[in-house]
Amino acid sequence: MCGIVGLYLKDQRLASELGALLTDMLITMSDRGPDSAGIAIYSAIGGSGDADAGPGKVTVQSDDPIADFDGLAADLADALGSPLEVSVNDTHAVLRVDGSLTRDRDSLMPLRSALARVRPGIRVMSFGQSIEIYKEVGLPGEVADRFDLSAMTGTHGIGHTRMATESAVTTNGAHPFNTGPDQCLVHNGSLSNHNSLRRELAHHGVTVETENDTEVAAAYLTHRMAQGDTLGEALQASIDDLDGFYTFVVGTADGFGVLRDPIACKPAVLAETDQYVAFGSEYRALVGLPDIASARVWEPEPATVYFWDRSGMSAQEATEYAHA
Amino acid sequence: MPTLDLQAHGLRSVNAVLQTAAADSVADGDYEIVNPLGSHAIAVGLNGPLSVTVKGSTGYYCAGMNKEADITVEGSVGPGVAENMMSGSVTVTGNASQYAGATAHGGLLDIKGNASSRCGISMKGIDIVVHGNIGHMSAFMAQAGRLVVLGDAGDALGDSLYEARIYVRGTVASLGADCVEKEMRPEHIEELTELLKRADADADPAEFTRYGSARSLYHFDVDNAGAY
């Protein structure tokens, strides 16, 4: 069991409340996942344009933040040969770097190597232009408090409460997973073919950092998108290539998607108003949202890709591919 | 009409009031539950005649194990509504999530909207009327009772069906193993007419198709191993 929440704003007047709304949703899902929690929050900084145009953002984590984050900006700038800013938030820190460093997995390599040299204890949680990921072991309420999630603002966000089944209860085993620029994935369920898929991805040069099944799914989607798929197409392909139980919620710089496996035993509820699209593993995660009583509330169909982005403000049940 | 505020009093307290009123037949009129806020296990285990209206949507297992009570949810319900109901009725004005009416032995489950996957799984005598559509694997291993669907049915309807009878007005995406279309005889029109009336459904029984068990998988036969 795990809990998923997601909120995608159509009306940016709610942007200042995004963190507070998501935090309440996340805490409501504590029963479904009390061992760890995480949130991916997309802020408008950098936007979704050309990566060269705006500053890149890399969220990192350390188990020894006092030592690791002390003097990090200067040491890393030296090692990297370009300036950067560091904003520390508890065990995490957001590095603001040149946009060319966060364009894709390959362009992140210089930063990863520099980090490995100057602070080997630091791990990369996310990279891109707008995404920040915060995740730790502990009750969702405690995790939200330590990062002050409720004060965060942004355009959309995805949260996860974890009850581990497939790998250890660690920070790195917590969701969301980020494997490509501004991409993230959270998962309720368990994948049964993640080891063979991990080997297959390795053949294509895609490495997966943890033993976690969900990270394999995230890397799979990133790999498909690197080959030219849209997120919707990558999700569609995953119906054939991923075996197991899953409800996925995915985020991109300006998009938000939902997919359930064909058996669809993992719960999912979607709600949509003129102001937002919201996801909850259970309806009770959504009850605090504005005007929820008048929202369109429904259960997403199995094996059907749901995807929203900024190009179409109305719901795009993108592709009834599965039934086409 | 006594009104119980679920947020103010908490689930256990609200259920205790309802269960006591139902068991002792001391019902002080009809009960109304406000602020359900998607909570789980609302109005479960009512063991006597009582009328309860839930003003809003609920979570898992609403109205489970119901006996004799009439429960209405003005909203949608999460997974497992009316699970193992024995008698009485449960009405949902919105939609129902998966395994609505699972394993239930009796009573009427009336869903005005859609029901998702596994509706009526292993039903053992309940009558279920869904005014909209139902999802995949509905009536899986259904043993007795009637499932009436005014809309369409998803994949694998009635897989491994025993003696439950299924009536569908719309299309069926696919039939499960051992589930077949059957002739609508006068007694079926008659029972369907009565069921539609009980659920206030405005539909012509003649537009429905009946599905039932081919009875070829009742007992394991190795020659059928591939059919399960």
Image (cartoon, coloured by chain):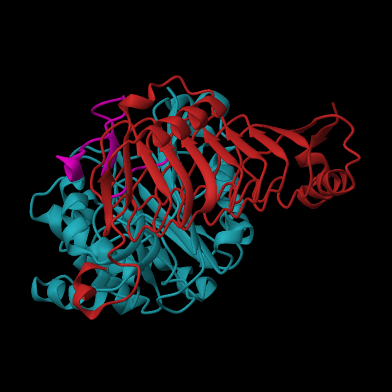
Chain colours: A cyan, B red
Q: Residue B62: x percent and y percent?
A: 63, 46
- Looking at the picture, tell me which residue is in the foreground, B37 or A57: B37
Magenta part, dominant SS: loop
Residue A196 visible to the viewer: yes
Question: Which residue reaches farthest front?
Answer: B186
Q: Magenta region: which residues? A: A299-324
Q: Residue B176: x percent and y percent?
A: 27, 55
Residue at x-position 45% and y-position 52%:
A267
Residue B112 visible to the viewer: no
- Looking at the picture, tell me which residue is in the foreground, A29 or A83: A29
Residue B150, by quadrant, is top left
Q: Is residue A283 left or right of residue A142?
A: left
Residue at x-position 56% and y-position 28%:
B198
- Looking at the picture, tell me which residue is in the foreground, A271 or A73: A271
Q: Is residue A3 left or right of residue B220?
A: right
Quadrant for the C terminus of chain A in the image: top left
- Numbered marks: total: 0
- Looking at the picture, tell me which residue is in the foreground, A36 or B47: B47
Q: Residue A116: x percent and y percent?
A: 30, 77
Q: Residue B133: x percent and y percent?
A: 37, 35
Vertical side of A261 occupied by B69: above or below: above
Residue B160, by quadrant, is bottom left
Residue at x-position 42% and y-position 25%:
A11
Vertical side of B3 occupied by B22: above or below: below
Residue B8, by quadrant, is top right
